[in-house]
Image (spheres, helix red, strand yellow):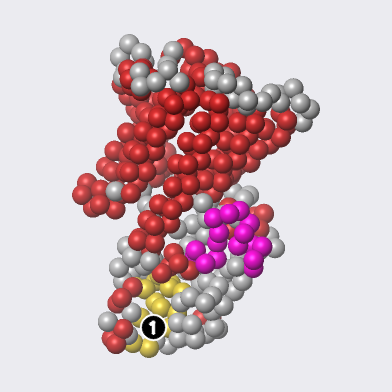
Amino acid sequence: MASSSLLLSIPVSLTRKPTSLHPIFLRKDSTFLRVGNKGELFRSMEYVDCRRTFARASTDGETDVAGDLLIGEKSAEFNLGKQKITSWIYFGVVLGVVLVVLNVVWIDNLTGFGKDFVDAVGSVSESHEIVMLLLILIFAAIHSGLASLRDAGEKLIGERAFRVLFAGLSLPLAVSTIVYFINHRYDGVQLWEVQGVAGVHELVWISNFISFFFLYPSTFNLLEVAAVDKPKMHLWETGIIRITRHPQMVGQVIWCLAHTLWIGNSVALAASVGLIGHHLFGVWNGDRRLAIRYGEAFEVLKSRTSVLPFAAILDGRQKLPQDYYKEFIKLPYIVITVLTLGAYFAHPLMQAGSYGLHW
């Protein structure tokens, strides 16, 4: 197929030699243009299949701070002018229906199956640590298993239907795991006690607050989460992705370490081991899925980023813009700040709700 490539005229903005060691691919409508290492611009039918190779630059050919063209999407982009009121009304309706169904089918002890599920898992062992790990393992198997089947599932039943299936199975299991953790977090063997130590509460609070800025990027577009907009597998490149390519894993590790430090017992430790293990698997599985979906474009992004926070920055593969802070002054991050603060003050309500279920 390469022999059919045709040399195109090169726009002035693209005549420079890319600094990346890898070829860069730009998307212009449905046509992929290949920029070779020497700056040549080719049209190649090899890269028309966007399920395997996809790279996205802004329409004006925007470059990154290092001079490389952005191949991924800008994180946390949210344009109010492009939002449809009807879409958000639909989102509200969908959210309301989901919560009602979740309550009736799973949460309510009179009508739902949530308590029966937790009791069934609990019958395996009297150890709260083992039950905690089993609940996380079941959730992880369903959640990551369905994520691995996403490409095939979307081809079979469509993007929206697969998202509904994914959420319909993952959400109840997540609720059960969270409720069980809240109800049994102070059970088990006390390993240390630092709640009375000066500064520990502040350290834990700040760590939890920071963790949500890492956890959130997997759900930048809530309309996609609710399948109001067609769900997509995104290749983010800016914002928190400059610090780590897997912010959700980093956020989960920070959250687990903070809660384990504060609670200091074997149940909290078991929960942290399970959750961190699941997210470490997600690092490998996520990279694998992105490589299959985006091909060489992902390899370019991978070469510019790191799994360990700040590693790519420290070794010079990623250079932060001088105005890097602007990549965080965006509506989605403002919303998550408000919600994180709200969740902290709502802890007593969450605990009371969990206690009332007797799971």
State which quarter of the image contains the C terminus: top left
Residue under circle 1?
42
Q: Is residue 290 magenta?
A: no
The image shows residue 28 at horizontal and vertical percentages of: 39, 71
State which quarter of the image contains the N terminus: bottom left
| Badge 1 density bin: few <14, some 14–19, many ≥20, Cα 10 Å | some
Helix, strand or loop at disc 1?
A: strand
Residue 133 in view, yes or no = yes
The foreground one among 37 and 101 is 37
**Quick one: which residue is furthest to the left in this view?**
156
Residue 167 in view, yes or no = no
- Left or right position of 286 against 245: left
Quarter of the image holding residue 97? top left
The foreground one among 350 and 226 is 350
Q: Residue at x 29, y 53 (%)?
A: 151
The image shows residue 138 at horizontal and vertical percentages of: 36, 33
Q: Where 3 falls versus 268 (above or below)?
A: below
Q: Where 259 falls versus 236 (above or below)?
A: above
The boundaries of the magenta stretch are 301-316
- Left or right position of 108 against 80: left
Residue type (three-letter) at the residue carrying disc 1 = Phe
Q: How many marks?
A: 1
Quarter of the image holding residue 66? bottom right
The image shows residue 12 at horizontal and vertical percentages of: 52, 84
Q: Residue at x 30, y 14 (%)?
A: 111
The foreground one among 72 and 252 is 252
Q: Residue at x 45, y 67 (%)?
A: 299
Q: Residue at x 67, y 54 (%)?
A: 325
Q: Where 286 falls versus 315 (above or below)?
A: above
- Left or right position of 115 against 196: left
The image shows residue 298 at horizontal and vertical percentages of: 44, 64
Quarter of the image holding residue 127? top left
